[in-house]
Amino acid sequence: MGAGKPFLIAKLAFIFVILLVMMIPLSMIRGQIEDRERTRDSAIGEISHKWGAPQAVNGPMLAVPFTRVKMVESSRVISGRNGREETVIERKPAVEIDTAYFLPETLAVSGRLNPQIRYRGIFEAVLFSAGLEMRGTFAPPDFGKLQIPEKDVRWKDAEVILGIADSHGVRENIVMKWDGVLCSFSPSAMPPLWGGGGVIGVRVPVSASNSGHAFSINLNLNGSGELTLAPFGKETHVELAADWPSPSFSGAYLPSKRDVTAKSFSASWDIFYLARRFPQQWTGANVSAADFSAALFGVKLITPANSYQKTLRSTKYGLLCISLTFMVFFMFEIFNVKSVHPVQYLLVSLALCLFYMLLLSTSEFLGFGPAYLIASVATVAVIAGYSRAVLGGGSRAVVMGGGLALLYGYFYILLQLEDYALLMGSVGLFAVLAGIMYFTRRVDWYASDKTLS
C-alpha cells in the first residue's frame, strides 16, 4: 500500500474534540424529547381532569360509630401556702366518638370497561367508561372482638362507605340494595382512610342480632388509563373485561386467569384476606393509607408504542453512531483515499444529530417505526451524497451509506429487544472493534509518513 497522509495523530485529536462538542446537541435533543413528553402528559392530564382521572375503588366497608370514655388531663394554677402559686393536674373522664370498621365476608365484582381515545392537538389520551357490579355479604358486627361494650355502639349511625379516587368521574346516582331494600349513596363526612379521593356513604340498618347482610352496588364511572380495586372481602373475586388489545395488569396481584386477544381481554382475580396487610375489622386509624394502596390491583389500558421513550433511548446510541461514522472516514484517510477536513467531520456529525430531531418530530404523527425509517433513510441519503463529494467516488459513498444503513438497522433491533439489548449491544460492539483492529492491523502508527507495510 502507498503512503498515508501526515498528522493523523493531530487529526485524531480534532475528531475527539468534535465528539466532545457533539455531546452538547445530543443533550439538548434529550431535553427536547423530555419536554415534548411533559407536554403530552400535560395534555392528557387536562383531558383526564375533565373526564375522570385513573380510578381506584376502595370498598365497600361498614363503619359503625361508638362512644369511648377517655381520661383527659388538664392543669390549673391555684394559690398555695404562703401565697405561692401551684399547678394542679386534674384527670377527668371525657366521652369521644370513634368508629369501628368491618369488611365484607364475600365480595364479587364484575365489570366491563368501554375504552375510547380522545385527542388534544396531536396528543391522545386513553379514556374509559366502566360499569361495575359489586355483590357480597357482611357478617354481623362483632364488637366483642374489639373489646367494646355493645351499649356504647351507635347502631343508628351505621354507614356503608365507598371510596372513589376521582368522584368527578361518577356518571350517575349510585344505588345499593341492602337486604333487598334500595338506598342511594351521598357524599360522606367519613375521612378517606385510603389517603385521598372522595368518600360516599349510605345509612343502613345494622344490629348484632342479625344473621348477616347481603348487598349489591351498581357503579358507573368515567376514568382514564387505569382502574384498580382493593380486596376488601375475606374472599374477593373480580372479573374485568374490555375491547382493548394491550392491557397491563398492575398492582399487588396478578390475575388467576386471563385471556388476551388481538382485540380484547378478560381477566379474573381470586384473593383471600390473608394475602393483604389489613384485617377484617379494626377501630380508629389502626390501618394506614399505605396498607390500602399496597393492596390495590387492576388493569392499565396502555398504548403499545411509547415513541418518546424509544426516541430517548435511541439518543443513547448517538455518540456511538457518530464515532463509528467518523471511524469509517478516518480509515479512508489512513488508506490514502482523500483527506477529510475537520469542518467536514463537524457537518457529518450535525447531520447525524439532526436524525434524532427528525425522528422525534415525525414520530408524533406517524409512530416510532415509520418515523425511524423516514429519518434513517433521509440521513443515510444525505451523508452518502456528501461522502461522494468528499471522498471522491461513488463506490466509497455506497460503502459509507451501506455501513450507516446497517448501523441504523442494528440500533433499531436493539430498541425492540429490550430484554436482550445489553447482550446484543455488547456482541455488536465487540464485532465492530474486532473489525477495526483487523483492517488497521498493518498500520505503522509510529512512522512519520504513515507508511503501510
Image (cartoon, rainbow, N blue to C red):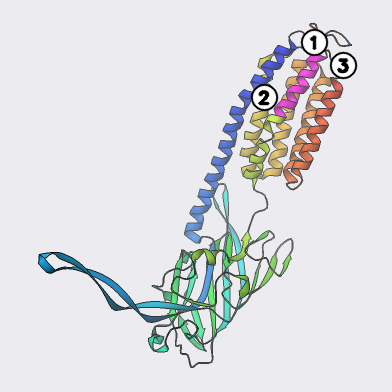
Secondary structure of the residue carrying numbered label 1: loop
- For discs 1 and 3, the disc positioned in front in the rendered view: 1
Structural crowding at the residue carrying mark 3, measured as other residues with C-alpha within 10 Å and reported as few (<14), some (14–19) or many (≥20): few
Q: Amino acid at mark 2?
A: Ser
For marks 2 and 3 on the same chain, the one whose residue lies earlier in the sequence: 2
Residue 185: tell me if it is visible: no
Q: Is residue 365 above or below residue 117?
A: above
The answer to whether residue 179 is magenta is no
- The residue beneath circle 3 is 442
Circle 1/circle 2 CB separation < 8 Å: no
Q: Which mark is residue 381?
A: none
Is residue 139 or residue 384 the one in the foreground?
139
For marks 1 and 2 on the same chain, the one whose residue lies earlier in the sequence: 2
Alpha carbon separation for disc pair 1 and 3: 12 Å
Q: Residue at x 57, y 46 (%)?
A: 122
Residue lying farthest to the left in this orientation? 83
- The residue beneath circle 1 is 446
Secondary structure of the residue carrying numbered label 3: loop
Q: Position of residue 43 (x, y in %)?
A: 51, 50
Residue lying farthest to the front in this orientation? 82
- The residue beneath circle 2 is 349
Structural crowding at the residue carrying mark 2, measured as other residues with C-alpha within 10 Å and reported as few (<14), some (14–19) or many (≥20): many
Secondary structure of the residue carrying numbered label 2: helix
Q: Which residues are magenta?
A: 321-335
Q: Is residue 144 above or below residue 368?
A: below
